[in-house]
Amino acid sequence: MKYMLLIYAGTGVTEPECTVEDWQAWDKALHDAGVKVSGESLADLVTATTVQVTGGDTTVTDGPFAETRELLGGFVVIDVPDLDVALDWAARSPGARDGGAVEVRPIADFG
Amino acid sequence: MRDRVEAVFREEHGLLLAALVHRFGDLDLAEEVASDAVEAALRTWPRDGVPTRPGAWLMTTARRKAIDRLRRDRTYADRLAVLAAEGERHEPAPELTDGLPDERLRLFFTCAHPALPADHRAALTLRCLAGLETPEVARAFLVPTATMAQRIVRAKKKIRYARIPFRVPGPDELPGRLPGVLQVVYLLFTTGYADERLDLADEAVRLGRILHRLLPEREVAGLLGLMLLTRARRGTRLVPLEEQDRTRWDADLIAEGTALAEAALTGGPPGPYGVQAAIAALHAEAPDPAGTDWPQIVALYDVLLHLAPTPVVALNRAAAVAMRDGPEAGLRLLDALAEDPALRTYPLLPAARADLLERLGRTAEAEAAYRAALALADTDTERTRLRNRLDRIGRDRPVGE
């Protein structure tokens, strides 16, 4: 069963305590366990552009679609037996700390 | 005969459902074939008599129905086969209860899974483990049946599509997950008890007993002990504790609850349910309010306040201090607590103040505090209790005051 872990960065004033090494260690653990399907980090939010097509007209606007307090910073898709295992990987992610959050979403199966 | 079948089904429902869920990995299929099996029982038992092991009969029939269903629907079967294969884990074989493997502990943890909304957890536990029908579950939470049906459908949908597993958490996860299960059972108990819907409180006790048999952890003993000791005071609770007729308390429940409270506090650091059970046990063993071990009760509240630092615990501690050191000492603590925004609409705070003011003979202030409590009270039971106190003050007050 595939789950996408959406990694949201906290926008609090405190500097994140987790280091690049923490992220590398998590990524290595995902690889070593053989559960990682794919994953990317997203570039800085100021580079985001949103496109909407309404009645044939295309509107391009600067910035992300949804203005939320937390910013989507990256994602990982994992393949694990059940939600408990997915939640455990999410809890081990550095992204879940320091006011950040990891949203766990099952990938829809239309098969 | 219908009653006989329904009684058996209700008794065996959780057991049957849990075994079917474990076998087929799907709650909907399990519920469907479980109710098919009951229909079959209603047809055949009146003709052939009730089988010697009704639970095993229902299980065999339900399993056969499930296999039929899976033969008819290959796609569904393939999905479930995947689930069953992935769900395979090495765990000790469960004990047999009435000839059925007892898989209910898994279902307890699934129904109380933290990924489900809190009010869905309690509803699902009542439905799946206590065997209540949806309208009964709706009545338990005082919501329309349609609302409850929707809630249960949503919860089951999340279990299926997010694949919340049917498993007992491992020893390393258990400390994080067990409190959620205990909270569901205790919520059912307090909901029933606060509102004098004692059948609901009894369902919670029944679930607590099952849970304790399957998982004799200290906090499970504490929860069951706490519920039994609270339940032992049945029928007397419209009256304040100090005026209750203690001969009407249930001695058997008190003995059982006290033993559980002791077990809960033995062999490791205490948990919040164990401490609350110990407090209830001290109340239960006291011959009267004056003969109650108030110093010990205050000491236990100190421990509880450390484990669960909530304003409500602080309030109860203040009431115990008042019994140990006198009403003035209690009042000082209560007045400090009145600053807490969490207690601003909590009816038991003015009620506790009123009680202490009354004991100090400050009748007018006590009356005002009782009225404040009455305005905040949210159950009929509580309102009746407060009106009784107000009437009494009114009677005692000299004419012309």
Image (tube, rainbow, N blue to C red):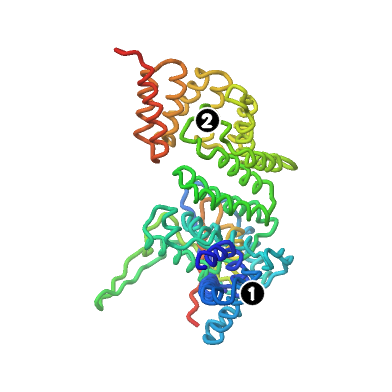
Label for residue B86?
A: 1
Q: Quadrant of residue A77?
A: bottom right
* Disc 2 to disc 1, C-alpha distance: 56 Å
Chain on which label 2 sits: B
Q: Determine the residue positioned at 42% across, 24% down.
A: B354
Quadrant position of the C terminus of chain B in the picture: top left
Q: Disc 2 or 1, which lies upstream in sequence?
A: 1
* Percent coordinates x, y for residue B13 in the rendering: 57, 65
Q: Determine the residue positioned at 46% across, 44% down.
A: B196
* Percent coordinates x, y for residue B341 in the rendering: 42, 34
* Percent coordinates x, y for residue B63 in the rendering: 60, 77
At numbered mark 1, what does the secondary structure look like: helix, strand or loop?
A: helix
Does residue B306 appear to the left or right of A58 in the view shown?
A: right
Give the answer, above or below, for where A43 lies relative to B291. Answer: below
Q: Is label 2 in contact with label 1 (beta carbons under 8 Å)? A: no
- Kind of residue sitting beneath label 1: Glu
Instruction: Choose mark 2 or mark 1, whichever is in front.
Output: 2
Give the answer, above or below, for where B189 lies relative to B375. Answer: below
- Please tell me how many numbered marks the rendered image carries: 2
Nearest the viewer among B127 and B237 is: B237
Nearest the viewer among B80 and B231 is: B231
* Percent coordinates x, y for residue B355 in the rendering: 45, 24
- Kind of residue sitting beneath label 2: Gln
Q: Determine the residue positioned at 55% across, 51% down.
A: B204
Label for residue B244?
A: 2
Q: Residues within 10 Å of mark 1 (few under 14, many from 20)?
A: some
Nearest the viewer among A11 and A93 is: A93
Does residue B368 appear to the left or right of B11 in the view shown?
A: left
